[in-house]
Image: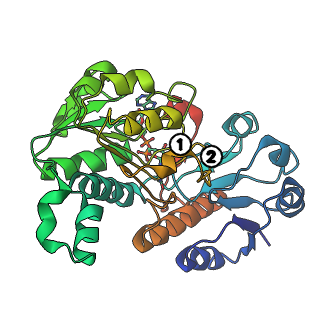
Amino acid sequence: MTKIAMMGEIHNDGWELLKKQNYDVFEIKDFSNENLIKELHKVSAVGLRTAALRKEVLENCPNIKIISRHGVGYDNVDLDYLNENNQALGVTGTSNAVSVAEHVMTMFLYLAKKINKSDNLVRMGNFKKKSSIGNFFELYQKNILILGFGRIGQAVSKRCLGFDANVIVYDPFIDSKLISERGCTKVEFEEGINQADFITVHMPLSNQTKNLINKKQFEKMKDNVIIVNTARGGIINEEDLYWALKNKKIYGAGTDVYETEPPIIDAPLFSLENIIFTPHNAALTLECRKRMAIEMAENIVFYLEDDKKLNKKNIINKEILNL
Ligand SMILES: NC(=O)c1ccc[n+]([C@@H]2O[C@H](COP(=O)([O-])OP(=O)(O)OC[C@H]3O[C@@H](n4cnc5c(N)ncnc54)[C@H](O)[C@@H]3O)[C@@H](O)[C@H]2O)c1
């Protein structure tokens, strides 16, 4: 019987799909290398949430044919090793763009409208002191800079355009024609940083993007900038973000992702009021968890059974992604 391991919990709809194939599906909860080698050396496929699956484990598990991510990022997998050894990687590319895009809009609006302060004011019986909150703002006609115009970046652009914002895009790998067809304008990085009122990050973490937003960039930004990161921690340098927020160099920030996860919450960043945090759950709405579990399972079935009816486009490798 084909054995499939789930590294982490998934929605039942994904389990059901795999069980229909008569696979022996089991969940792994202990992610130590020692236990992973013990459990994974006999499996044909792995469903992978956020735990790391590194070379030290993979080189002891030659039977793995596909690692199917429950999500789209794959910095927790050793892609070079997979390419060298002809093991496939699947991502749930069509599942989570909407969920993450809504998370970004939530953070933009929450910060721009000072919702936390308004809520607190009413709770404290200070309804009539509404002017004490100070100015708050609209998305209407603002410049929204999207860094990375892939699935999520494009989903965000659509929603921002619905607010009649002016969407500018930095993504050197995407043709300006596609960007303008989506109603947005392609810009160079510096140009975008200078013009933006809102910034949202949607590129992968890589050697090129690590610390891309640092003190130098914050210095060039308008003082009213609200910046949101739902991509990966480390693309925005956290120490420099602290500096920018503390010194009111920018207006506010929202982050779902951290340089280390879980983050060290006694770090100075967590003492500030002009930043909001979520626990890397932008893609974890109930609807999205269902979609991801199903798509992750479909990718496994497709790959193992070569079933042409299932969704082929999410099987990726370095060449296709041009990374
Ligand atoms: N917070 C969450 O729960 C969550 C959920 C899903 C995805 N993510 C993150 O969001 C990122 C984006 O996801 P996606 O599905 O849109 O990915 P995607 O691959 O569809 O798009 C990424 C885009 O980034 C662009 N890019 C790559 N390198 C770049 C660079 N140096 N400068 C500018 N642009 C660059 C690519 O050209 C591509 O268009 C993922 O890499 C992942 O890390 C987070």
Do residues under tags 2 and 1 come within 8 Å of each other at their CB atoms?
Answer: yes
Horizontal and vertical percent position of residue 315? 55, 48
Assign a secondary structure to mark 2: loop
For mark 1, what is the residue?
Answer: 233
Quarter of the rendered image showing ligand 1 = top left
Is residue 288 left or right of 207 when viewed as pictured?
A: left
Assign a secondary structure to mark 1: loop
- Disc ID at residue 260: 2
Residue 26, above or below 85: below
Horizontal and vertical percent position of residue 119? 26, 70
Distance from disc 2 to disc 1, alpha carbons, whole Å, reads 7 Å
The residue that appears at 47% across and 72% down in the rendered structure is: 290
Horizontal and vertical percent position of residue 101? 33, 54
The residue that appears at 76% across and 69% down in the rendered structure is: 29
The residue that appears at 33% across and 53% down in the rendered structure is: 104
Residue 106 shows up from this direction: yes
> Quadrant where the N terminus lies?
bottom right
Q: Amino acid at mark 1?
A: Gly
Asked whether 224 or 98 is in front, the reply is 224
Is residue 89 left or right of 205 when viewed as pictured?
A: right
Q: Who comes first in sequence, dot 2 or dot 1?
A: 1
Is residue 318 left or right of 97 when viewed as pictured?
A: right
Asked whether 216 or 299 is in front, the reply is 216
